[in-house]
Structure formats: structure tokens, C-alpha cells
Image (tube, helix red, strand yellow):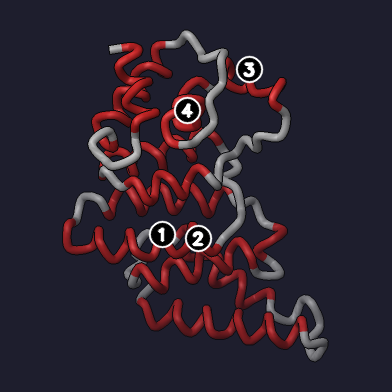
Amino acid sequence: MDDKYYRDLIDKVNRNEKAMWGGTDEPNDGYEDFNQLWGILGDEDVNVAPKTYFEAMELCINSFFGTIQDHSHVWRNIATHYAEALKDEAQKQSFNTELERFLNDVQSAVPDMEIYYDLMHSAIEDGNFRIANLLINHSPIEIEDWDQLEDDYQNYPEWAAYIEGLTDISYDHLPDAPIFKETIKKLYSAFGNLPNMEKLNNLYHRYF
């Protein structure tokens, strides 16, 4: 389907949202429009501008019907499109701009660690510090308890490398895992030359 088709659906879903929250619509009146918009996730021939795509993704997560869906389908679709966009220099800049806006506006966490890693891998491959940094805020793991952090670091050493390399958090019990050290090396290769990355530089030189 083309851009106009999905723009029309986006407009319909937005109108339905306003009517529903305004009390002039029954809750199920807009479901069919939302269901058609949700179809963008399985549309193999989708041909839309990045702005249209991410507006659709935001509604798939944040709209009335979107909030009750399995958001892993949305994030997996974004990860797939992100990897594809990096192969096309003409498309990459506009896609990255809209992805940044989406990550700033949407508060939803990525619900699946494998998908989260795929997104991070693309950001690192592209050397895009802004997107990598924004993805930290969408981590599947919420840091609530300092005592729990040791278990989280041991269970998710690649995630631990992102936290140690890209945030101000410094935890004494770093995982002794090859993937942790290898991820630190990749982060250093991508971002080590940027300003204010002394912490990442120190981590890299600790292992290499």
C-alpha cells in the first residue's frame, strides 16, 4: 500500500481517538480503522515516507486500541525497517530523523531483549550516538533496585555494556563475559572519538 492509503488511515484513527475521548463515539467504533492501520506491520509492499511510517507506529502503540496490543510486533517491525534503511544512503537520513522523533515522543519500552539488541546493533553500525543514547531509555529492563543490578548484569551482559558504556551508571560487579567485552569494543569503535566519552574510553582500555 502507498503513502496516501496509510495517511488516510492515520487521519481516521486520529479522528476516532478525538471522538472517543470526547465522549461522542462508542469505544469500538474505530476498531476497524485501527485494524487496517495495524496491517502496516504485515504489509510486505509498504511504500511510505518515514514520517508516515512512524506516525503509524506511534498509533499502533499509543492509541486506544494500540495500548492493548502486543508491542513486540511494532518494535520488531521498526528494527527490520531500521536495518533496511541503513542500506540506502538516500533514505537513511530521513528515516533516522523520524526514528529520533519517535524515540523522543514514545515512552514505551522495547518488550523483547532480542529486538532491543537488533535496534542497538543498527545504531552502533551506523555510528549514530543520538539514537543509541535514546534507545537506553527504551530498555526492556528498568533499573529500580541497585541490589538487583548485579543479577541483571550477569544475566544480560550485552545490555550491561550499553549501560556502562553509554550512561553515568558505574557498577562494581561487571560481568566477566566475552559479549560484554566485545560490546564495549564495538561501542568504543563507534563512539570513542566523541566528546565526553572518557568513561567509555576507560572501559575499553581496561580490557584492550
**Which of the two labelled residues, at mark 2 and mark 4, occupies the earlier sequence position?**
2
Q: Mark 4 and mark 2 in contact (Cβ < 8 Å)?
A: no
Which residue lies under the disc numbered 3?
150
Q: Position of residue 193 (x, y in %)?
A: 23, 36
Check the picture and name the quadrant holding the N terminus.
bottom left
Front tag of 2 and 4: 4
Q: Tell me if 47 is positioned left or right of 13 in this view.
A: left
> What is the C-alpha distance between the residues marked 2 and 4?
22 Å
Which residue lies under the disc numbered 2?
104
Q: Mark 1 and mark 2 in contact (Cβ < 8 Å)?
A: yes
Q: Secondary structure at mark 3?
A: helix
Q: Residue at x 45, y 31 (%)?
A: 162
Amino acid at the residue labelled 4: Glu
> Label 3 crowding class (10 Å Cα cut-off): few <14, some 14-19, many 20+?
some
Which residue lies under the disc numbered 1?
100
Front tag of 4 and 1: 4
In the picture shown, does residue 154 fall above or below 196?
above
Q: Residue at x 54, y 71 (%)?
A: 37
66, 42: nearer the viewer: 66
**Which of the two labelled residues, at mark 4 and mark 3, occupies the earlier sequence position?**
3
Q: Position of residue 11 (x, y in %)?
A: 54, 84
> What is the C-alpha distance between the residues marked 1 and 3?
30 Å
Q: Mark 3 and mark 4 in contact (Cβ < 8 Å)?
A: no
Q: Position of residue 73 (x, y in %)?
A: 54, 50
Give the farthest residue toward the top: 176
Marking on residue 164: 4
Q: Secondary structure at mark 2?
A: helix
32, 9: nearer the viewer: 9
Amino acid at the residue labelled 1: Glu
Amino acid at the residue labelled 3: Glu
**Which of the two labelled residues, at mark 4 and mark 1, occupies the earlier sequence position?**
1
